[in-house]
Image: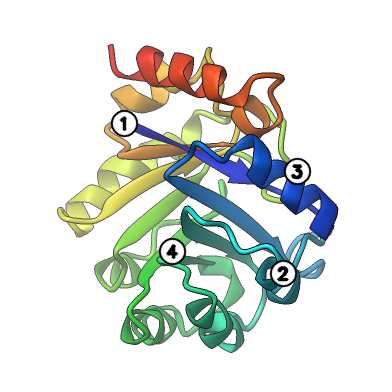
């Protein structure tokens, strides 16, 4: 299982600081929140454009009307765009719109949201939320991890990630569920020594 460092920031200054801390990373997971889908509001595409990461970008979009964001992030060079199942009724169509730009399309499911089997068939990646989205540093909820096997049955080739509450105590559990990657924001990006912590998590989840 891979660990992807997460970035949840509210200003250009915070973004630059986070990218400096993660300069060694090959890939980052960036949270984009509109302040409506979740109460929190983070940086938007315009801010990201001012400090574009050199590493591969996986964008986690927590916003309504996700189709209106697709071209913005495609132009910024994002490799993946993950939308939320709860944010639109036109999930399959939106995922195919993402794929048409050359980005990989992802679908995220909140803890209480059932797996949309049709959407999963149109996605390259699925993100199982093990916390309620909006803030980092929450405790992992185990029940949503059951979705991983269901998603895999719907789409055997899909890449499955887990987001929320990933740390040295939970990464082993998540790895054993068959997830391909886990996002670590509080545990890695906000750690005193991000690279050292990242390596420790990788060792623990790949024993």
Q: CA distance from mark 2 to mark 3?
A: 13 Å
Q: Quadrant of the N terminus?
A: top left
Which of the marked residues, 3 or 1, is nearer the chain's N terminus? 1
Q: Element under label 4?
A: strand
Between marks 4 and 2 in the image, the one whose residue lies nearer the viewer: 2
Q: CA distance from mark 4 to mark 2?
A: 27 Å
| Residue 17 numbered mark, or none | 3
| Residue 50 numbered mark, or none | 2
Which of the marked residues, 4 or 1, is nearer the chain's N terminus? 1
Q: Is residue 62 above or below residue 16?
A: below
Q: Element under label 3?
A: helix
Q: Element under label 2?
A: helix
Between marks 4 and 1 in the image, the one whose residue lies nearer the viewer: 1
Residue indicated by mark 4: 107
Q: CA distance from mark 3 to mark 4?
A: 28 Å
Q: Give the residue drawn at x 65%, y 46%.
A: 19
Given contact means CB atoms under 8 Å apart, are the residues at marks 3 and 1 in contact?
no
Q: Is residue 150 above or below residue 21?
A: below
| Residue 1 numbered mark, or none | 1
| Residue 9 numbered mark, or none | none
Q: CA distance from mark 4 to mark 1?
A: 19 Å
Which of the marked residues, 4 or 2, is nearer the chain's N terminus? 2
């Amino acid at each position: 299982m891979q660990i992807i460092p997460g970035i949840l920031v509210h200003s250009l200054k915070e973004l630059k600081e986070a990218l400096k801390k993660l300069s060694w990373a090959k890939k980052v997971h960036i949270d984009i929140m509109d302040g409506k889908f979740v109460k929190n509001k983070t940086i938007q595409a315009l801010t990201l454009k001012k400090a574009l990461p050199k590493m591969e970008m996986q964008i986690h979009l927590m916003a309504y009307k996700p189709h209106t964001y697709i071209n913005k992030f495609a132009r910024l060079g994002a490799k993946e765009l993950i939308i939320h199942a709860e944010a639109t009724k036109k999930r399959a169509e939106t995922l195919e719109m993402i794929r048409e730009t050359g980005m990989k399309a992802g679908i995220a499911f909140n803890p209480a949201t059932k797996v949309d089997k049709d959407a999963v068939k149109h996605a390259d990646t699925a993100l199982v939320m093990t916390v309620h989205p909006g803030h980092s540093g929450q405790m992992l909820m185990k029940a949503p991890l059951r979705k991983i096997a269901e998603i895999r049955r719907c789409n055997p080739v899909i890449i499955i990630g887990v987001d929320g509450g990933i740390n040295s105590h939970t990464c082993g559990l998540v790895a054993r569920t068959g997830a391909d990657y886990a996002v670590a924001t509080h545990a890695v990006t906000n750690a005193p020594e991000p690279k050292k912590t990242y390596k420790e998590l990788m060792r623990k989840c790949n024993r």
